[in-house]
Amino acid sequence: MKKRLLLLVLSFALCLPTFAKNMCVNLKNGETVSFDLEDVDNVTICENIPVVDESDTPLKFKILSENTVEVIRDDSYSELSSVTIPAKVRIDGKVYDVTSIGNDAFLWCGSLISTNIPDGITYIGNGAFYGCSDLTSIEIPESVTFLGDGAFNSCSGLTSIKISNSIKSIGDSTFADCRSLTSINIPENLTSIGDVAFYGCSSLTSIKIPESLTSIGYDAFCWCSSLTSINIPENLTSIGEDAFYGCSELEPKLLIYDKGTKCYGWIGDKEKCTNIEIPEGVTSIGDGAFEDCSGLTSVSIPSGVTSIGSSAFSGCSKLANINIPKTVTSIGWYAFQGCSSLTSITIPESVTKIESSAFYNCNNLEVTIDNSKDNIKLGYDVFYHCKSVTYLK
């Protein structure tokens, strides 16, 4: 009724331009809006956004620009159980848009149960809600385009979260140790998930990765022990080391990505990793690919592989036979550490670099190195405790 009455008043005013040139509207919050009727084309009734006086909110603000402010940290927040962040705030008589929640703004606010983030917030800073252990759910509005590192780290009571589709990346440790988190919607246009992003989210059961994603950081889903399924999009080009370490409930399988060119390694129950045939087309075996797969007995590596990553086969104590193809140029740190069942291996002349401790404690291994080009570089303790090493020149 009020909107209809206002519309009638404005319509009447617009029909009488000869009687008045300017029109003023007095708002309930004390603001006055003035405009020239000759410049008005049409009138739209907009949603009223209340202005909160700085003295009427427990929050503290930092002025960022002529028109914008940021919510900043204050020790007084520690006793708050709920927070409503205003969209607009009046400071010393001037009205500002609240556009960001600053770094560590609600750090360790352990009593905070709920918070309302208004549309208009574009930035949630690093550690903004770090350690808010009683926070159970939160909805991030579509206006938010940046979500900082560790923003919700250690929010152990958080069970669900809705993320704005405007967010393109989830930063490092953003949701780490959110142990009660069971579901999360991933934005459709997300391109990256940072290091340790969901580390220790032990109640998370499934997650749908959008096709837009290109990278997953190291330890990103480490110790998500209830995670049963995850899809890997075709465009994914980078998966960090131990991204799925400790995800014992995942469907056990060999994970190949980047359009079939990279071998991430084994995911799921490591006890089910016994015989592996890496498919043709793979050019690299990632760091920690089969680390601690103690039941692995044999591996077939295709001729296109050029690099074997650090700790790729570390701790594979039953691995008895492996053939290094003549396309391999580098073998990483601790790549075959503790492979005590290996008895012989030939390193082809294509290998120009073997990192430190690559065959550390392979105590039954006889190594033959084709160094006919005399161009191989060895790190420290490469063959420590190996049975023998023979160089061919």
Image (spheres, helix red, strand yellow):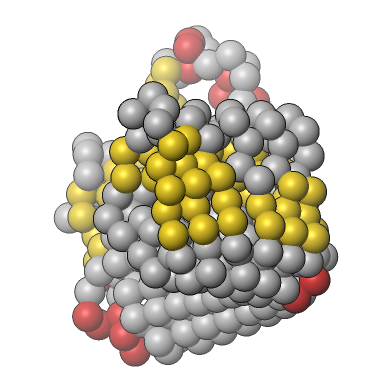
Q: Position of residue 300 (x, y in %)?
A: 74, 47
**Vertical position of residue 141 compared to residue 150: above or below:** above
Q: Position of residue 369 (x, y in %)?
A: 46, 42
Number of disc labels? 0
Q: Is residue 154 visible?
A: yes
**Vertical position of residue 386 compared to residue 49: above or below:** below
Q: Residue at x 31, y 38 (%)?
A: 377
Front residue of this view, candidates 28 and 360 = 360
Q: Residue at x 58, y 29 (%)?
A: 327
Q: Position of residue 246 (x, y in %)?
A: 62, 74
Front residue of this view, candidates 289 and 327 = 327
**131 left or right of 273 in image:** left
**23 left or right of 213 in image:** left
Q: Is residue 114 visible?
A: no
**266 left or right of 134 in image:** right
Q: Residue at x 34, y 89 (%)?
A: 79
**Vertical position of residue 277 compared to residue 386: above or below:** above
Q: Position of residue 331 (x, y in %)?
A: 47, 45
Q: Residue at x 77, y 55 (%)?
A: 276
Quadrant in which the C terminus appears: top left
Residue closest to the far left: 92
